[in-house]
Amino acid sequence: MVSDKVASEPGGVVTLTGGGCTPEGDVTVQVGDRMIGTIVATPEGKFIAILTLPQMIAVGRYDIVVTCGVVHTAPIDIVVTTNLDSGESVLALFIFFVLICIALWRRRRLVPPSGKGDPQPEPL
């Protein structure tokens, strides 16, 4: 059996293809211990199953098990992906560096150069 994916999110779609089944026999598909459904093999004993993974499945590694006279297995990792919005991250980093530059510039104006004594007030 061949799976088009090695990892998917819950509710994702996976396509399975294989053969060696009883011609026109039942092909049962399960993920872990969950029965997903049954299809019928072709007259040549082949199958193509478009599998929709359960929405309520925990993250982890599972075996996809196809039974059709013979037993086929393929591992699949259930993962959760997130999108990182780099725009906000870049803006936050830019503001941080601007504030650091302002703080250093103000400190430089307030601290007298070494060896020059006390700072003199600026004339108005």
Image: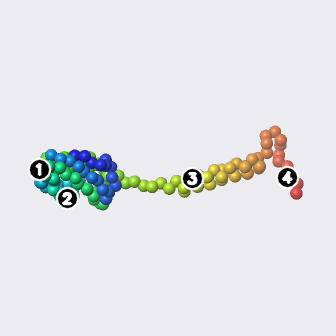
Q: Residue at x 12, y 54 (%)?
A: 24
In the depicted view, which residue is nearer to us: 47 or 88? 47
Q: Are marks 1 and 3 in contact (CB under 8 Å)?
A: no
Residue 113 position within the rendered picture, expressed as x and y whole percent measured from the top left: 79, 42
The alpha-carbon separation of the residues under discs 4 and 3 comes to 40 Å
Q: Earlier in the sequence, mark 4 or mark 2?
A: 2
Identify residue for label 2: 37
The alpha-carbon separation of the residues under discs 4 and 1 comes to 97 Å
The alpha-carbon separation of the residues under discs 2 and 3 comes to 47 Å
Residue 44 position within the rendered picture, expressed as x and y whole percent measured from the top left: 14, 49
Q: Nearer the viewer, mark 1 or mark 3?
A: 1
Q: Earlier in the sequence, mark 1 or mark 2?
A: 1
Q: Amino acid at mark 3?
A: Val
Q: Earlier in the sequence, mark 2 or mark 3?
A: 2
Q: Nearer the viewer, mark 4 or mark 1?
A: 1
Residue 90 circle label: 3
Q: Amino acid at mark 2?
A: Gly
Q: Nearer the viewer, mark 4 or mark 2?
A: 2
Q: Amino acid at mark 1?
A: Thr
The alpha-carbon separation of the residues under discs 1 and 3 comes to 58 Å
Identify residue for label 4: 121
